[in-house]
Amino acid sequence: MTDRSDRHLLITGGNGFLGRALAADLYNRGWLVRVTTRQPLSNQKGVESVIVGDMATAIDWSASLMNVDCVIHTAGRAHQTSAAGAQDYQAFRRTNVDATLALAEQAAAAGVRRFIFISSAHVNGGATHGRGFRYDDTPQPNGPYARSKLDAERGLAEIAKRTSLELVVLRPPLIIGLGVKGNLATLYRAVRRGWPLPFATINRNRRDLVSCGTLADLAHVCIDHDQAPGQTFMVSDGRPLSTRALVQSMADEIGVRPNLWPMPKGLLRLALKAAGRGRMASQLTEDLEIDISHTCQRLNWTPPTAAADIER
C-alpha cells in the first residue's frame, strides 16, 4: 500500500464546483489534501486551505506548494459569452495560460513530482461527427476558452521537458452535477422549477458528460500510475446521453418529474441563437462523443459509472 503519511496533494480552485468535489473525494481516499482559494473555505472537513489572490495577477505559490507531491490544477476562467472574441481570449490567457504556467514553474522549483492539469475536451472541437474525440486528434479548439486550455497544455509540456515535473493532462467534456455553473446550471434550475422544456423529441443526439465522481476517480489513478506522465487522457462517464435523457437524469437526481414538450430541432436552434444562446443550442442539439479507449487501456481503468451499470 502506498504510504501517504506525508504526501500532500494541492488542489487549486478549492471553492469551485470541481475543486470542492475533488478535495472531498481524495481526502476520503486517505490523502492529505490542501486547496487554494480566493476566499476562506467553508464546510470542508479535514482539508487544509491556503488563500491566494486572483489568478489573473502574480501569485507567490510557495506556501501552497510546501511538502506537496502532486498538484491537481482545476482553477481557471471558464465562462464566456456567445460573442467571445479577441479581448475575451486575453482575459482567458491571463488566468488559464499565464497563471497556470507560473504555478507549474514554481511547482517544479519546489520539487513537486507530478502536475495534473484539468483541460477540456473542447480543445478537440465543439462537436463530433460519427466518432468520438480521441486523445491524439489534431486540436481544433472551440472558442477562446478552449484555445487558452490548448495553449496552457503546450506551455506545460515545455516546462515538463526541461524540468523533472511529470505532466498529466485530462480533457473532460461538460462536468455534470448539482452545483455546476454555466449553461448546465441554467438547465438544472429549469428542471427543478418545473419549467416547460422543449426537448421531448431531442432524443437522437449523443453527448458524453462526466460526473465529478468519475473525474475524481481518474485523477486518483493518475496521481501515482507509472503510465500517466506525458499523456493526455480523454475522460467521460462512458455513456453518452441524448438531451432528453440528460434532462431525465437531472430530474432523477433532483427528485422531480421533468416538464418536457416537443419542438422541432431546427426551430429550437433558431430560437436559442436568436436569444443569444448559440453555445447552448450546440450543447443541446449536436453530438459530442468522447473516445476513452486510450485512457482505459493505458491505465487499466473503467469509469465507475460504467462499472456500476455492468454490475447492475
Image (cartoon, rainbow, N blue to C red):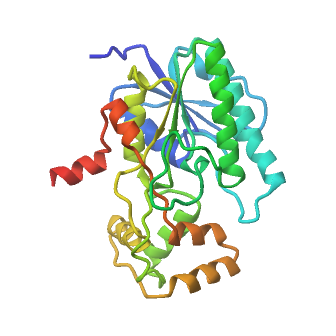
The vertical placement of 98 against 17, above or below, is above
Q: What's the residue at 38%, 79% (across, down)?
A: 258
Residue 99 visible in the snapshot: yes
Location of residue 242 in the rendering, given as x and y in whole percent from the top left corner: 40, 69
Quarter residue 4 falls in = top left
The vertical placement of 182 against 171, above or below, is below
Q: Residue furthest right?
A: 87
Check the picture and name the quadrant holding the N terminus.
top left
Left or right: residue 151 versus residue 166 is right
Location of residue 23 in the rendering, given as x and y in whole percent from the top left corner: 45, 36
The vertical placement of 8 against 133, above or below, is above
Residue 62 visible in the snapshot: no
Q: Nearer the viewer, residue 258 or 294?
A: 294
The vertical placement of 114 against 13, above or below, is above
Location of residue 147 in the rendering, given as x and y in whole percent from the top left corner: 69, 46
Check the picture and name the quadrant holding the C terminus.
bottom left
Q: Nearer the viewer, residue 280 or 233?
A: 233
Q: Nearer the viewer, residue 216 or 139?
A: 139
Count numbered badges in the picture.
0
Left or right: residue 65 versus residue 229 is right
Left or right: residue 211 versus residue 276 is left
Location of residue 67 in the rendering, given as x and y in whole percent from the top left corner: 53, 14
Q: What's the residue at 66%, 21% (across, down)?
A: 159
Q: Residue furthest left?
A: 312
Q: What's the residue at 50%, 40% (across, down)?
A: 135
Q: Nearer the viewer, residue 279 or 183?
A: 279
